[in-house]
Amino acid sequence: MTDQEQLNTFLAVQNYMTIAVTLDDGTPWATPVRIRAWEGTVFEWDSHVETEHSRAIADRSNIAISIYTPEGENTIQFGFYAHATAEQITEPNEHGIARYRATVSKSFINDASFKKREVHLG
């Protein structure tokens, strides 16, 4: 299986990813979010507009994404890592929840071989 096939198979079944942003004071902040949509280089999720990560995205659109599965009884270690640009794409609903979109500019995988490799989404 090629790296691209392995990545597409992996991403097709993922429900969560971790996004990392930079807060106003320069502190890094990482948080898990539920993936609402994924197609090609685009990931979408819903978040409250007042969370640390949502406020950070409003000020600085550069983020990092990480999705991984550790090696276990029924899994093989695999990780996806990316640089992306994020933005709020809907107005918040009555509960303050809006949809966010990240567009990946550069991405990598790492598996049980422990060899980080650049891959292209799409």
Image (cartoon, rainbow, N blue to C red):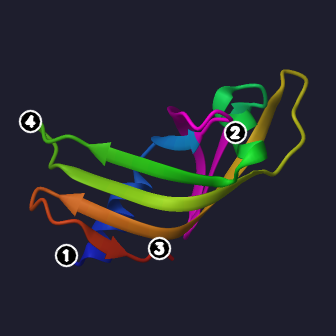
Determine whether, in the image, residue 19 is placed left or right of residue 67. Answer: right
Q: Amino acid at mark 1?
A: Met
Mark 4 Cα-neighbour bin, 10 Å: few <14, some 14–19, many ≥20: few
> Rounded to the nearest whole Å, what is the CA distance between mark 2 and mark 3?
25 Å
Above or below, comparing residue 69 to residue 31 in the picture: below
Q: Which residues are magenta?
A: 22-46
Marks 4 and 3 close (CB-CB < 8 Å): no
Q: Would you name the residue on which mark 2 appears? A: 56
Which secondary structure, mark 1? loop
In front: label 2 or label 4: 2
Q: Amino acid at mark 3?
A: Leu
Q: How many marks?
A: 4
Above or below, comparing residue 109 to residue 87 in the picture: below
Task: Assign the magenta stretch its main secondary structure.
Answer: strand
> Rounded to the nearest whole Å, what is the CA distance between mark 1 and mark 4?
21 Å
Marks 2 and 3 close (CB-CB < 8 Å): no
In front: label 2 or label 3: 2
Q: Position of residue 89 (x, y in %)?
A: 81, 51
Q: Position of residue 86 (x, y in %)?
A: 67, 54
Which secondary structure, mark 4? loop
- Residue occupying image coordinates x 57% and y 42%: 21
Determine whether, in the image, residue 71 is placed left or right of residue 46. Answer: left
- Residue occupying image coordinates x 39% and y 57%: 81
Q: Would you name the residue on which mark 4 appears? A: 73
Q: Amino acid at mark 2?
A: Ala
Mark 2 Cα-neighbour bin, 10 Å: few <14, some 14–19, many ≥20: many
Going from the N terminus, do you reach mark 2 or mark 4 first?
A: 2
Query: Any mark on residue 1, and which?
Result: 1
The residue nearer to you, when weighing 57 against 90, is 57
> Rounded to the nearest whole Å, what is the CA distance between mark 4 and mark 3?
28 Å
